[in-house]
Image (spheres, helix red, strand yellow):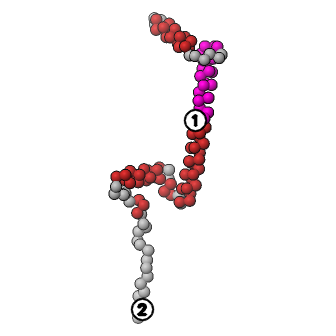
Amino acid sequence: MATQTQTKLPPPRPDLSFARPPKSPVALFFWRWRMWFESTFVLSMLEPWEKILLLTILSISITLFMTGALKYMPQHLERMQHRAVYYLSGQEGEKNLSSIWQWLNRSADVLGKKEL
C-alpha cells in the first residue's frame, strides 16, 4: 500500500534561546539592559546588518556631538557671560562679575525695603 516516509521537519517553535533570561546575576543584568534597549528602540524588528548600521550611525553622531560640545562649549559659555555682563551693566569688556553682584544686591535691598 502506501509507504510512509519519515521526513525531518523543523522544530514546531522557533529557537528563542536569545530571549531566555540567563542564570547568573551579572548576565541577567546585561540581558535585561539589552532587552530594554532593543524593545525601546524597536531594534528587535531589524535584521542584524540593519542593527549594526543603525548603531554605527548613532555612535558616530554621539561622538561628533560630544566632541563639539566639549571643544566649543567653554568658549561659548565665556562669550555668553560677556554678553550677559554687557546687557546687565552696560559696560563692555568687564571681566569680573563683582559689579553685577553689587548691582543685584542693591536692587534686592531696594525691593526688600519697599513697602507694598
Q: From the viewer's perspective, is 67 left or right of 108?
A: right
Q: Nearer the viewer, residue 5 or 27?
A: 27
Judge by depth and name the residue closer to the eye, 6 or 87. Answer: 87
Residue 16 in the image: x percent, y percent? 41, 63
* Residue that appears at 34% across and 57% down: 23
- Report the residue marked by disc 2: 2
Query: What is the C-alpha distance between the residues marked 1 and 2?
Result: 77 Å
In the image, taking residue 24 as reference, residue 82 lies left or right, namely right
Q: Amino acid at mark 2?
A: Ala
**Residue 85 sits above or below residue 46 on the image:** above
Residue 76 in the image, given as x and y percentages of width and height: 61, 29
Q: Is residue 112 visible?
A: yes
Dot 1: few (<14), some (14–19), or many (≥20) neighbours within 10 Å?
A: few
Look at the image and give the residue range highlighted in magenta: 71-91
Q: Residue at x 60, y 17 (%)?
A: 95
The residue at 58%/16% (across/down) is 96
Tag 1 secondary structure: helix
Residue 98's image quarter? top right
Dominant secondary structure, magenta: helix
Q: Is residue 27 magenta?
A: no
Q: Report x, y in % for residue 18.
A: 42, 61
Residue beneath disc 1: 70
